[in-house]
Image (cartoon, grey):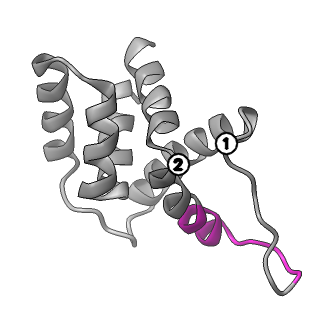
Amino acid sequence: MTGYEKIAILLTELGAEASEKILHILKLSPAEMNKISKQILSLGSYNPRNLFHVQRETSVLEEVREYGQLRGIYREVAPQNGGFLMVDDKIEALKREIPKTPEDVANVLRGWLDS
């Protein structure tokens, strides 16, 4: 998966408000913004019953989570009931945390563009 594909997936998952903050921090060139826009359009609509869509989303969010854990930005919180967090719960928790640290997310995206 290219950096532009990862960025398109992450931005669509985060929603407009968080995405705008992150893109503002990145200060992308018009050509970079155009590539991201094209990737977003090529994603089409998300289908939670489509295994490919789910795996693609999970892969991108896991990469962001790992980056955050390595840098002390994100940490897993144990569930209230003492059980295990399901993958869906981890993804939802991550999606809630990412907009709180747009600078850090912008760093991840910049790394994807530079790779």
Residue on which disc 1 sits = 73
Query: Could you tell me residue 14's position as x and y percent?
Result: 37, 56
The image quadrant where one finds the C terminus is top left
Query: Is residue 70 shown above or below 94?
Result: above
SS at badge 1 = loop
Query: Is residue 28 shown above or below 69?
Result: above
SS at badge 2 = helix
29 with respect to 9 (left or right): left
Q: CA distance from mark 2 to mark 1?
A: 14 Å
The amino acid pointed to by label 1 is Ile
- Magenta segment, which residues? 82-93
Query: Is residue 30 shown above or below 14?
Result: above
For disc 2, the neighbor class at 10 Å (few under 14, some 14 to 19, many from 20) is many
56 with respect to 30 (left or right): right
For disc 1, the neighbor class at 10 Å (few under 14, some 14 to 19, many from 20) is some
Circle nearer the viewer, 2 or 1: 1
The amino acid pointed to by label 2 is Leu
Residue on which disc 2 sits = 61
Label placed on residue 83:
none
